[in-house]
Amino acid sequence: MIKVLLADDHAIVRAGLARIVEESGDIEVVAEASDGREALRLALEAPVDVAVVDISMPGLDGLEVAAQLLAICPELPIIILTMHEEEQYVVRAVEVGVMGYVTKRSAPEQLVAAIRKVYGGARYLSEAAVEMLALRLAKGVSGKSPLDSLSTRELQVLRQLASGQTNREIAEAYNISVKTVDTYRFRLLKKLSLRNNAELSRFAIQNHLIEP
C-alpha cells in the first residue's frame, strides 16, 4: 500500500479526496492535516510515502510546507493540490521541487494517477499545469508578469498581507521576525509600484493570488 499524508484546511474536501484515494485499492491515507504546521509534524512523525498538500492553508502555505519537508526529507514525493490555475503557482511549485501539481478541479480524475506516478519516481503535472508552463515558455521575456520579479517568500508574504494577516501573524507563520516582514512589505510596495496594503490586496485579487 502507498501511504499518503493528505493536508487541506477544509474537512469536507479532505474527506472527499480520502474516499477517492482509498477506493483505488493500493493507496491508504495514514495521516490528515488541517494546516501547514500540522502537515509538517505529521509528515515527519508518520511513515508516509507521498504527501498531498493544499497550496492555500492557514499558517504555513503549501509551498512553504513543501520547501521545509524537502529540506529534511529530500526523497519524499510531494504533490501540490490547488484551486489556482495561474502559471505563477506552477512555476513556483516546480522551483520548490515538488513532484506533482494537480488542480482541485481535476483531482477526482487525476489524483490517484498522480500519487502512483510520483511514488514511482516520475513527475506528474496536470494537463492544465503543462499548458501553463508551455504558455510561460512561449511568452518568453516579453511576456513577463510583475510577479516574476518576486521571490517565492515575497509572493507568500504578499498573499498573507493581502488576506489581512498582520505582520506579527506572518512572522509567526514563517518563523521570521516582524522586522523581516516589514522589509518584505517595503520590497513588495517598491517592486510593484504600490503605496499601501489596500493596493496590495487589490493587486493580489486582480492577479488571482487570493479570492475576492
Image (tube, rainbow, N blue to C red):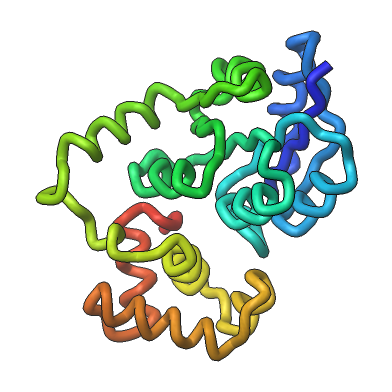
Residue 43 in the image, given as x and y percentages of width and height: 80, 45
Q: Residue at x 31, y 56 (%)?
A: 207
Residue 146 located left or right of residue 167:
left
Q: Quadrant of the N terminus?
A: top right
Q: Residue furthest left?
A: 142
Residue 44 in the image, given as x and y percentages of width and height: 83, 48
Q: Residue furthest top?
A: 25
Asked where in the image residue 7 lies, by quadrant, the reply is: top right
Q: Is residue 115 above or below residue 150?
A: above
Q: Is residue 188 above or below residue 84?
A: below
Residue 29 located left or right of residue 186:
right
Residue 173 in the image, given as x and y percentages of width and height: 66, 70
Asked where in the image residue 122 lies, by quadrant, the reply is: top right
Q: Residue at x 81, y 40 (%)?
A: 32
Total residue callouts: 0
Asked where in the image residue 116 lies, by quadrant, the reply is: top right
Q: Is residue 156 above or below residue 33?
A: below
Residue 192 in the image, given as x and y percentages of width and height: 26, 73
Q: Residue at x 79, y 11 (%)?
A: 26
Residue 78 located left or right of residue 194:
right
Q: Residue furthest bottom?
A: 179
Q: Is residue 209 above or below residue 185?
A: above
Residue 151 located left or right of residue 54:
left
Q: Quadrant of the C terminus?
A: bottom left
Q: Residue at x 87, y 35 (%)?
A: 47
